[in-house]
Amino acid sequence: MLSMKNVSKDFVIHNQGGIKITPIKDITFEVKRNEIFCLTGQSGTGKSTILKMIYGAYRVTKGNIYLKINGEKYNISDCQIYEILEIRKKYISYISQFLQILPRTTALQYVSAPLLEKGADKKEAEEKAKEMLSFFNIKKKLFNLSPLSFSGGEQQRVNIARGLIENKPLLLLDEPTASLDVKNKERVIKKIKQYKENGGTLIGIFHDEKLKKELSDRIFDVKNNRYL
Amino acid sequence: MPKILEINSLSKIYGKGCSYCNKIIYEKSEESICPECNSVLALKDISFSIKKGDRFGIVGESGSGKSTLLKILYLLETPTTGDVIIYDNSAPRHMSNISINQVNYFQNNIMSFIRQNPYQGLNFNFTASGNVAERVIAKGNQNFNSVREISNSFLSKTGILKNRFYDLPSQFSGGQQQRIQIAKALASNPQIILLDEPTTGLDLTIQAVILDLLKALYEEYGFTMVVVSHDLGIIKHLTDICIVMKNGSIVEFGLTDQILQDPQHPYTQSLISSML
Ligand SMILES: Nc1ncnc2c1ncn2[C@@H]1O[C@H](COP(=O)(O)OP(=O)(O)OP(=O)(O)O)[C@@H](O)[C@H]1O
Ligand SMILES: [Mg+2]
Ligand SMILES: [Zn+2]
């Protein structure tokens, strides 16, 4: 479904004398449809960089990222910006490491937003969002408050709820589970398994060993450019 | 989506201009004042296009030419050279040399302009309702009751309370004045809304409220949005695509998250690091 072929990424920092940072060098791997594919490696090896290149938020310096989906074929590294927007809209959800949110937005608004953007009915979208939030043990009385005031674990669950509300075919998950307790980890595992049963494909970075073991079909070691 | 707006080789010189001005413009050098004739080179050979439904950002420092560009798009100023094309129901309409009537048509029916300064965007001698009504009337509605009803419904839409409809703009807070401007902009049911620093000068929580409102209205109406700001936070929350301007030129163009997370140009990088 997704194939990274000899991908490299340079960052050139101009205001520091043009130094070049190359977090990703010549990486090659392939993700099959309907698998849970885990990227692993120490901090700074470029795991998030890879996800961001797949999402089109980082430009690819060298190499190609091929995406085959619903009978269509794209080379993400060559895509025009409108194509990237379309690919995201149709196929890819991305959950970042940190909640990115405007100060006054409520948890309910934040989680239902992807459905509303797709043109869903407001009431239906909110019902679905409430269901998701409850599933992840977010208390009802928090629904109409800003997630910025929530605990770290609550914020992460809100973030995951938003990413999973849409059921897009490809989900990119960037370490959203670092501060979860056992009970909530179980919930996340359950929801991700459900997502896979429904045909979804996931490329994820899991901080947590338990999640990584229980969920991953395959694990790719980014530093050494090989499958484990 | 089809194109809705196209800008081809647009330049703007304030002053008489000379051949050295042209040299600066076409070689894209950094000077913003011509050393030969002292003209101000506000825009230098800019080209880009916007598609229907885009949320398009224009970001850059003070003096980079953002507002000049927006004023040309709204036909308040004419470019020195180059062309603006607006697609009116997919038919390309060239804005160079159009008649005053045509200018009115585009300003009243196709585009709306929300200004940073409510004193420029609102008539302070009219009530809130009267300000919105002005747009509805300009579009051709002559029926007093229907004008009033439509105007008030747009004020409600932007969160102005019923008992304030007939207050004067000066009796409202800055955030509320922006709401009235937004109501006014929406009232002509425009295809394109141009916003110049829509929340600058408001305190942070009010900014967030106005950004939320604009996002919700965008989802409801599906207009095309062109947002000018020096504030990357606003560009981040309101746009999907943006250009970065410096000294009258475009230095970078891309998805807003690419520009913010992976800026390529030295200028964009310093703009972003100054924001952190
Ligand atoms: N009417 C004018 N006469 C002369 N120079 C002008 C005029 N309008 C703009 N300029 C000049 O053109 C350049 C671009 O100005 P512009 O207002 O477009 O910048 P901006 O990017 O919108 O800045 P800001 O962020 O401060 O609003 C500046 O050097 C400005 O002084
Ligand atoms: Mg300006
Ligand atoms: Zn000159």
Image (cartoon, rainbow, N blue to C red):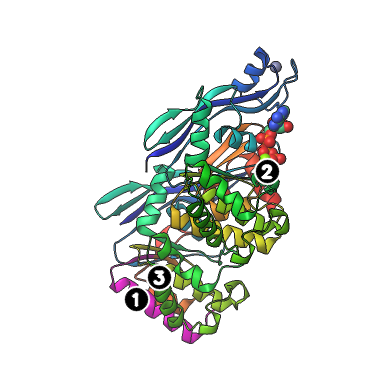
Say above or below: B37 vs A143: above
Give the Cα separation between the discs numbered 2 and 1.
Answer: 56 Å
Visible residue check, residue B107:
yes
Q: How crowded is mark 3: few (under 14 residues within 10 Å), some or many (20 or more)?
A: many
Residue at the spot 52% in from the left edge and 34% down from the top edge: B104
Q: Check disc 3 and report its element: helix, strand or loop.
A: helix
Residue under numbered circle 1: A193
Inspect the image, locate mark 3, and give the three-letter code of the amino acid beneath it. Answer: Ala
Tell me which corner region of the image, top left, top right, bottom left or bottom right, holds residue B52. top left
> Identity of the amino acid at label 2?
Gln
Residue pushed farthest left?
A71
| Residue A125 badge | 3
User: Where's residue A10, x and y in %?
Assistant: 54, 46
Left-right relation of A134 to A198: right
Secondary structure character of the magenta stretch overall = helix
Ligand 1, seen in the image, is in the quarter at: top right
* In the foreground, A226 or B202: B202
Q: Read off the magenta span.
A: A180-202
> Is residue B43 rendered to the left or right of residue B92?
right
Q: Residue at x 42, y 35 (%)?
A: B87
The mark lying in front, picked from 2 and 1, is 2
Residue A194 lies in the magenta stretch: yes
Quadrant (top left, top right, bottom left, bottom right) of the N terminus of chain B: top left
Residue B164 occupies quadrant? bottom right
Q: Does the magenta run of residues contain A13?
A: no
Residue type at mark 1: give it.
Answer: Lys
Q: Where is residue A173 in the image (x, y as percent from the top left)?
A: 45, 66
Q: Mark 1 lies on which chain?
A: A
Q: Is mark 2 on a helix, strand or loop?
A: helix
Element under disc 1: helix
